[in-house]
Image (cartoon, grey):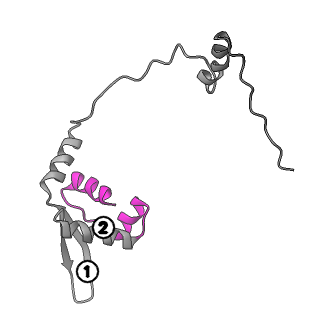
Amino acid sequence: MLAVIAFEVTKRKACMMAIGAVAALAGVSESTVKRAIRQARVLGFLTVQERRLSRYRNDTNIVRIISKAWTSWLELRGSGGGVQRRTGTNTSGLPEGRGGAVEALPTRLSSAGRGKLPLPQRRSCT
């Protein structure tokens, strides 16, 4: 849930989403979001600005990240820094099919003089 807030802060400099929307995006309950924001506020990671419209109506709160370490990490992440770009493993020489390396294992063992390994038998549930 704090990752949702961090993503919104990187896009708009502040998170003005409702707690229900943050909870829905994070896949958690609203009370979990409230607890996480409260704990992050106590630890000094973020501030929450309440926006009162009248005695009984409120607008969504504005959440800003004030932690220097967190903001610098978000800036590094946004610029693409800190990520090692590597090419994938060349798998063109591997045998075809699902689990090709496992299927080749018994033949290698038999060539070493150990014999073929028996395949496990399926048991029926009757």
Q: Which amino acid is tagged 1? A: Asn
**Residue found at the very far front of the displayed protein:** 114
Which residue lies under the disc numbered 1? 58
Q: Which amino acid is tagged 2? A: Ala
Residue 41 painted magenta = no
Residue 43: x, y in percent?
Answer: 19, 66
Q: Is residue 80 above or below residue 26?
A: above
- Range covered by the magenta-colored residues: 1-29
Residue 25 painted magenta = yes
Q: Which mark is residue 36?
A: 2
Q: Nearer the viewer, mark 1 or mark 2?
A: 2
Q: Nearer the viewer, residue 25 or 51?
A: 25
Counting residues from the start of the chain, the first of labels 1 and 2 encountered is: 2
> Does residue 113 show up?
yes
Q: Is residue 80 left or right of residue 89?
A: left
The image quadrant that residue 123 belongs to is top right
Q: CA distance from mark 1 to mark 2?
A: 21 Å
The image quadrant that residue 39 belongs to is bottom left
Asked which secondary structure carries label 2, the reply is helix
Residue 103: x, y in percent?
Answer: 65, 22
Name the dominant secondary structure of the magenta segment. helix
> Does residue 18 show up?
no
Asked which secondary structure carries label 1, the reply is strand
Q: Residues within 10 Å of mark 2 (few under 14, many from 20)?
A: some
